Amino acid sequence: MESWQLFGTQWVELRYVLLACIIFTFFWKSIIGRQSLKLPPGPKGWPLLGILPMLADGERVYKKFTKIAAEHGAIFSARLGMFHCVVLNDYEIIREATCRSGDMFLDRPRTPLFEILGGGKGIGGAFYSEGWKDHRRFSLKMMRSYGVGQAHIEPMIAREAWFLNKEFASENGKPFNPTPYLGNATANVICAIMFGNRFKFDDPWFVKMMTILGDMGHLFKVSGPINCFPFLRHIPFSPYKKLRKLVDDHYIFLDKKINEVKLGYVEANPRQFIDAYLDEVRKREVDGYVGTLDEAHLKFDISDMFNAGTETSANTLKWAVLYLALYPEIQVKVQDEMDLVIGRKRMPLLSDRSQLPYTMATLAEVQRIGCIAPLSVPHAATEDTTLRGYDIPKGTIVTLNIWSVMFDPEVWPEPEKFKPERFLNENGCYSKNEKLIPFSIGRRNCVGEQLAVMELFIYFTHLLHRFKLKYPDEEPTPDLEGFFGATLGPYPYKVCALERSLDFEYRQPMQRE
């Protein structure tokens, strides 16, 4: 008995010694070890917690960062729990870090969130420095082969816009929540590219997938504390365990669909993204080089494409419908312009964009004020480096405060106001501003940007060409702060879609083979 008690006592003491060593090492590396570095200035923060108490007053993090930047400078550093973070709050600094500094700031941080998105072990090749370039290059190549960024894909998107308009029309002018319809429309284009076909909005597989994607959209909202203190994931009933199960279920769900599609795979005869991916894997096996582009990573790339090409577009459209319903005078200007240029005998085409300056300006203003990715996706320094004369140690989380750029009053006077005219020049022509960066910027910007740009224009113009959008009188004033999960979108709201007359039969467009 005495020997067992002694062993137990020694074990308890050993655990305390190990804990003390861990705490000492943490403080040495995070505080003493950094004193010799010239880090960006920033608020001191609390021991262990860093500036987290400053961020706990309910104000949105991106707004708080903007205020800190006003005091400490456009590039500041701070500790968020156990992680050191550098926040960039100026367009030129963000551009320098993401476009001009090689790959120095293009990694992703090793946080619990990315760990579970990478399949539990961070193997998702689309995320980390070991394989992200290869995966991104291949994904962009395949997207281009399916016509993304070209007129070839327009019939596919127009066809989905027809289904979207059909759902709006089915509400018969009564108040309804447009959120599910908009999400379904954007996801179905990705489905057609990934799996080779669209799904009916009530298809069981499609409904389940959209539910999972919606739940995953809340990841950032509930994962914050765990990302700052990774050891919290080991606490019983931790939200991390729910998140991990959700993501695991998501990948299992995708695996089933991928295996169904693979049953019809014929080498060198690709029908969609999955077939093309398998062709590439086979080719690399013959050449003796595969890297991380293998069948085990296919589900990660498909998931990444859904996350990049669905929620971003859907949330932008949600903001567009809401703002146009709240600003009927702007809506009328858009519709008058389309009626003058396009008429009522056909639907808008991508080729009409150059002749619709006010429509383009309105859509740009929606993207600015909606700011769907206010903090972008976190970056990380790939090695010890510098930026604007400051030291940035390897592994430092680099956050791009896109919101501070989109709401910079020196660039956008009265940034809180919805003013499409800010994108028109003195001649009334649409004037694109390089500081409008809704999809972030640089070599790790949103991989679905080109597709999103095409979708937004077609869905937006088709809806406004056919319907007058009205915010119901009996509905409460909407909260334009929005819900900040994985992206920033409006809280659920209702709208009325009143049909405008067309001088032709609006039939379902045929998809080009």
Image (tube, grey):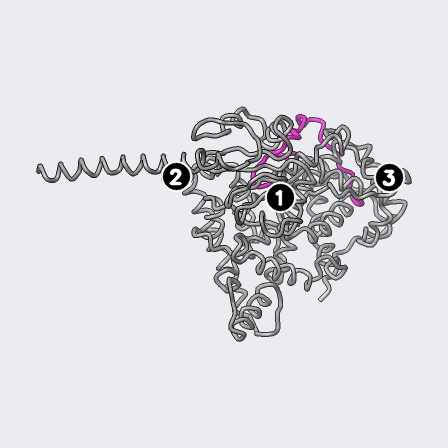
Kind of residue at disc 1:
Pro
Count of labels in the image:
3
Kind of residue at disc 3:
Asn
Q: Position of residue 467 (x, y in %)?
A: 78, 42
Tell which residue pokes out farthest to the front in this image. Answer: 36
Which marked residue is nearer to the observer: mark 1 or mark 3? 3
Q: Nearer the viewer, residue 312 or 19?
A: 19
- Residue beneath disc 1: 180
Along the polypeptide, which appears first: circle 1 or circle 3?
A: 1
- Residue 231 is tagged as 2
* The magenta segment: 465-494
Q: CA distance from mark 2 to mark 1?
A: 36 Å
**Would residue 352 be found to the left or right of residue 268 on screen?**
right
Along the polypeptide, which appears first: circle 3 or circle 2?
A: 2
Kind of residue at disc 2:
Phe
Q: Quadrant of the C terminus?
A: bottom right
- Residue beneath disc 3: 425
For residue 429, above or below residue 417: below
Q: Is residue 367 visible?
A: yes
Disc 3 element: loop
Point 66% across, 30% down: residue:
480
Along the polypeptide, which appears first: circle 2 or circle 1?
A: 1
Q: Position of residue 78 (x, y in %)?
A: 53, 33
